[in-house]
Image: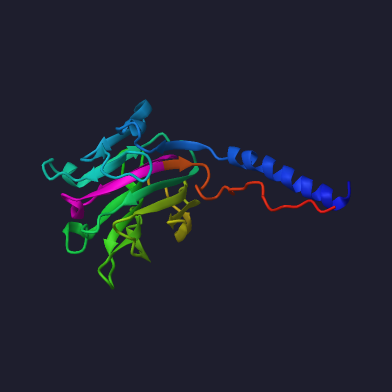
Amino acid sequence: MNKRKSLAIMIIMMLFILVPISQSFAQTYFSSSFETGNVSEWLADDGGNHQGGGYVTTERALTGKYSWKAYNDPKLSSPDNISAKLLRWRFDYKEAFYSAWYFWPTDYNTKGVDGEYINMFQWKERTSPYDPTWIVAVKPSVSTGKDELVVHDWHGKKIYRTGIAFPKGTWFKLEAFLRAGRTDGQLIVWFNDQEIFRLNQINTLGNTPSYLMWGVGNYGGAGLDKFIYVDDAKVSSQRSTSVAQLSAPTNLRIVP
């Protein structure tokens, strides 16, 4: 067997072997597509809770039949009427990738509405007073007035504007990498797989000793009687797009 033939065979064998090996390194810590018809995945093992309004529905879904409709019901007492959210706290990992898909209705705007702010993706302390640490939120743009994504350092009392005016009336994906740390923390945020924010050597823990809780929601005064849909939430050891989707090529020829 000549060298060219041997090399081609080796490449094909490596591609078949590499896929399961590389994928096996990715570990899913948590996932929820709401296909149970409820929020039981978030509440499992007493490791999370559901606050404010919101319910699982078949009205709209990214995948499968169900999604979570984060509806701020004005009939609820304050602050439950503006704080539809799901939280999960069984994340004893120094670092992880967090993601969820959102559908934001076209008639939902924060400009000129109470607070002009909606918390939709957050990490919180796991010890009293359970304050947020970092938040991906929605605020109106200073220049255009259109809703855009911002990153909020709660303890640092600073809001970073990304300039991303996210699409309404269609599904979009938020993903973030967070490394827990008092001075060596890191936060990276992607919107539809495009990096929009990165900070290193920061406090991501707030005042909590070691680990955080994470959640999704529709939380803020601007959201009264408004809703968004959330689907396919996931916490993993790898980015959802980071594992190479390799397959054996079909156009390889063994040249004699």
Compare residues 66 and 93 and report the one nearer the observer. Answer: 66
Q: Tell me, what colour scheme is on the image?
A: rainbow
Point out residue 30 in the picture as x, y percentages from the top left corner: 43, 36
Q: Is residue 222 magenta?
A: yes
Q: Is residue 200 magenta?
A: no
Kindly identify the residue that appears in the image at 33 percent across and 47 percent down: 132
Residue 124 shows in this picture: no
- Number of dots carrying numbers: 0
- Residue extending furthest left? 75
In the rendered structure, which segment of residues is drawn in magenta? 208-233
Kindly identify the residue that appears in the image at 37 percent across and 54 percent down: 172
Compare residues 154 and 85 and report the one nearer the observer. Answer: 85
Point out residue 229 in the picture as x, y percentages from the top left corner: 29, 47
26 to 105, vertically: above or below: above
Kindly identify the residue that appears in the image at 55 percent across and 50 percent down: 242
Image quadrant assignment for residue 73: top left
94 to 139, vertically: above or below: above
**169 displayed left or right of 240:** left
**205 displayed left or right of 15:** left
